[in-house]
Amino acid sequence: MRNKIIKKKKKGNRRKEIVYLFLLAAIILVTPHLLRYFDGDILIGEESYYHARIAKEITEKGLIFYDNLSYQGRDYFINPYHLILALFYYIFGELSYKLLPFLLGMFSLLLFYLILKEHFKEEAILILFIFILSPAFIYAFTILNSYSFFMFLGLLSFFFCRKLKKGKGKEFIISLIIFAIIPFFGLFETFLMILFLLFYYLHKKDNKLLIMILVMLAISSVYYTYIATGYNRELPIFLEKDIIRDSITELGAMIGLGIFNVLLALIGIFLSWKWKKNSKKIYLIYSIILILVISHYYVGNEVNIYLNFIFSVFAGLALYRMINLRWEMKLIRNLTLIILIAGLLFSCAGYIKILSNSLPNNDIINGLEYLKGLEKDNIVSYYKNGFWIEYYGKKSVMDSNFYYAPDLNERFKDSNFILKSYDLEKTKQKLDKYNIGYILITPEMKNNVKGILFLFRNKETFKNIYKWNDVEIWEVVKKEAG
């Protein structure tokens, strides 16, 4: 009887802990938007503007296969995320830009917990706590991005995969449908999901999982063979690669991991080494971590969003072990735990502040609003401003969507030349090449584009038509022949 009462009490306490964790997650995901609300309620970052624009266009025109604005015109490949965002936009309007990431975050968190609690008992709460405080979680479910929907679908499919043997067949059908959608998110996402399915197969030994892998392989083979035969994929050779800098939030990574998250995860990985004798599956987990780390070089720091799931598990296991370890001095244990938990909290708070203060700001938005009403098209600016320019209805020479972009590296070289060169005649040739109408200068560009700032003195070629708090728009003046 006493044992039953103790079990009931533990179960009740665990439910309270889960409720508190979900409340914490809701507060964390809402806070960046609340902080930004008092500064004009502007969408955060670059990526949000690309997805918002495409979703709006789908709502107005139906399915699209060509994007007139990106890279002055390029083919568009259907992304399932844009379809769900378009549906939300149709129902909720611009509120969907904040509502959809929030809902995907809360439901993904629920699915992650339901999966965790089958494999971990006491540790699941700590894993979830660390996951919620991680910068990668905050980014994924605050800003509009396709990774959030991909993760939700992936977790949902694995949730149903848990019941494959016990189920009546509907779990298999639902999982199969989800896995059939995955290839349209991207080649890397498909590869990653296949890796996790292989790992799950080693755990479950269910041949239905192999069928799902074969379905994904078949769909992705047809889809990406079609793309490969018609489109050239250039890797952006101009990006600086630094895995450590691009992984740690405290070092400047926008999509990164907190340094205390990484520290705890490394401790957890070190402690897990003893499991290798009992299970060979740990080697596959190590392999997946290694693949994700190497993928940074080819895919980008969005890999951190996926790596965060694994690191949160190891970090949670490490924290649980440290809490329950027999310490000779309780004071040292308490101080160690306080430092680690405080570090996680400060990392979370610091990242929320960075996110809420990120560009664009009101000055940039006002400049873009002015740009929207101008007659000419084709804008050159720093490529990271491309999504903002396109959102306001103008064609950008280049933006941050590098997948199958036309003449990617040549465009970067040319736009970089325009912004940095002191040679007027050669600059004019590049401007004519892309039929540039306007040049947008933001405050962050000023120190790196001194060439074009010098050339702006030539009033026969350039005319300043907008200037406000270091946001400038210059018109390219073209003399009529004859």
Image: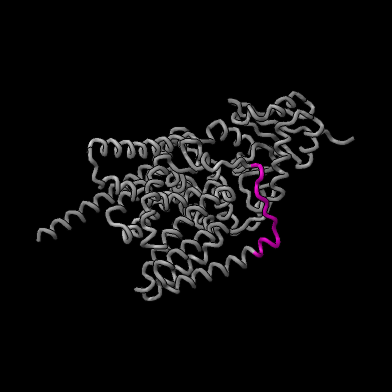
Tell me what residue is drawn at x 69 percent, y 34 percent.
Answer: 439
Name the residue nearer the viewer: 441 or 297.
297
- Looking at this rendering, what residue extends furthest in the left direction? 1
Q: Locate residue 457: give its quadrant.
A: top right
Q: Is residue 475 above or below residue 111?
A: above
Q: Position of residue 45 (x, y in %)?
A: 52, 40
Q: Is residue 222 above or below residue 62?
A: below
Q: Is residue 232 something one can see in this rendering?
A: yes
Tell me what residue is drawn at x 52 percent, y 67 percent.
Answer: 180
Q: Is residue 37 something one can see in this rendering?
A: no
Q: Locate residue 424: give its quadrant.
A: top right
Q: Position of residue 128 (x, y in %)?
A: 34, 50
Q: Tell me which colouring the rendered structure shows.
A: one colour
For the N terminus, the image quarter is: bottom left
Q: Position of residue 358 (x, y in %)?
A: 50, 35
- Looking at this rendering, what residue extends furthest in the right direction? 482
- Looking at this rendering, what residue extends furthest in the bottom direction? 168
| Range covered by the magenta-colored residues | 225-238
For the C terminus, the image quarter is: top right
Side of 155 where 468 appears, left or right: right
Name the residue nearer the viewer: 150 or 100.
150
| Magenta run includes residue 229 | yes
Tell me what residue is drawn at x 51 percent, y 59 percent.
Answer: 192
| Magenta run includes residue 291 | no
Q: Position of residue 289 (x, y in %)?
A: 47, 53
- Looking at this rendering, what residue extends furthest in the front direction? 277
Name the residue nearer the viewer: 333 or 102.
333
